[in-house]
Amino acid sequence: MKPTKTSITLAPMTTLKVSDGLVKDDVLVVGLVSTNTKGAIAIESGDLALDTKSLVASLVEMGATGKADEITKIPGGPARLIIFTGLGAKTKTYSDETLRRASGSAARALAGTNSATFALPTKDLSAVYAVAEGAGLGAYLFNEFRGSTKDDHKAPLKSATVFTQLASSANTHSAIKRAAIIAKYTHLVRDLVNTPPSHLTPDSFTKKLTASIKAAGGLKAGLKVTIWDEKQLKSQGFGGIVGVGQGSANPPRLLHISYTPKNKNAKRFAFVGKGITFDTGGLNLKPGLGMEAMKSDMSGAAAVCAATLAIAELALPVAIECWAPLAENMPSDTATRPSDIITIFGGKTVEVLNPDAEGRLVLADALVKAQASKKKLDGIIDVATLTGAQVVALGTRTSAVMTNNAQLSELFLAAAKSCGEQFWPMPLPIELRASLDSPVADLANIGDKNGGMLVAGLFLKEFVSDELPWLHLDIAGPAYNEAKAHGYTPVGGTGVSMRSLVRLVEQA
């Protein structure tokens, strides 16, 4: 049978391919596993036959173990260099996430390389996709603001080929295409999160997204954008967005992206993402230590916008109404004060006891606005780096899910699991709701400090119709990686939740 090769190019650099022909790339990537407790190891090269005896002997001498995230390099063989990426313990079938992370680790280690063939276990289409997606996600570099040191940082891997006997299948080509699109829009989220607040304001966020929408095809792709400026926000009663943004020299914005598929009877979901381009805490000023990471407080907005563009480029038959309330939370003589009362879009009043609990205020405006459309919604999902309590409860790699609809939550959790994104369901205890009562307004923006993540979810629930299926995703810890890179996850913005949102829509 004639060797098969198909490809699609990622913007701007990395190309993903699939092939069952001769290995012609500079580098070969294969898996390495541990086989028992005595330190024995074995090579997993999928559909590619390798003479492994001498290679294993060399790897043992080098102390390789095959553990996850371990990278070992040996020159020679069927390519100039062989990269061994750890898969953990040997098993008959490796999970998609194991393959995705191993592929991502290898791609990160291959910065500065032109091309590499990834020969990992790919028994089915799902495994092929995981290897391709891992390579695309791992081949990432944010280098926009380096000057004299830019050349010191190697460019991401330019071309990654997945070696598999499934290369001739049309479904395989579609999977590679999807992996490329998902990687591209994950990179968009990361780029937005990593951009410093000196260059990413509410206004420049809307400009960057408008450019991305145009590049994705604009109206021809079913995409339409609408932007509210500070004057329109104030005149139309968006008290949450205005109240949070009024202390900054950079005025707030509300960005709306609609995606309308060709199927006019399609299901319709609303995405709402918290877009605080920088959060000082306002007049409840945060401690200086760690405040630099607050440039990531718009991760939710970046994720829902990028997910909408990915859904459009994949031409999925589900309509999306995406809302990104954008503000910069700064301390000044015009900033919202503790005990101020603001009126959320729709008329509900909130006593702002803590200006540092600002994300829920901008989200409240957008949640109500999203439900004001005459077009029926099948579900609404908000995504936010909302509470430090999320990190305390679940750490930096697991996000929280809160809901008023068990069926939608189960569907989302299944979608997230298939993507390798870690989410955990959390309750909305009714007994905590009373702590949000205010003596002077409809409710306060903070309540019981114990269970702060759950209280924030209860606050948002006040702005969602009981009949409308709703999910609240708190991604505070996982959105920004301040530790070392791992798997396909770089330091800085991670892009978390974007892939799960797209998968949810596919399954819906």
Image (cartoon, rainbow, N blue to C red):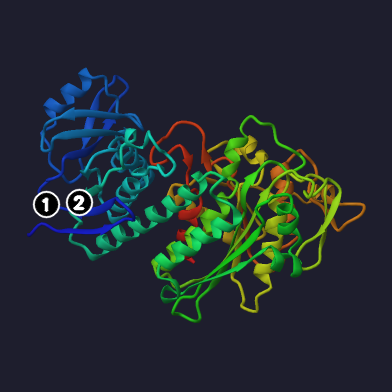
Left/right of residue 310 with respect to residue 108 in the rendered view: right
Q: CA distance from mark 2 to mark 1?
A: 9 Å
Q: Residue at x 22, y 21 (%)?
A: 60
Spot occupied by residue 248 in the image (x, y as percentages of width and height):
69, 50
Q: In this figure, what is the number of numbered marks?
A: 2
Q: Residue at x 29, y 25 (%)?
A: 65
Residue type beneath disc 2: Thr
Q: Is residue 391 above or below residue 457?
A: above
Circle 1 residue = 21
Circle 2 residue = 164
Spot occupied by residue 493 in the image (x, y as percentages of width and height):
49, 43
Q: Is residue 395 above or below residue 309?
A: above
Left/right of residue 15 with respect to residue 472 in the rendered view: left
Nearer to us of marks 2 and 1 is 1
Spot occupied by residue 201 in the image (x, y as percentages of width and height):
59, 52
Report the quarter where the N terminus lies: bottom left
Q: Residue at x 12, y 46 (%)?
A: 24
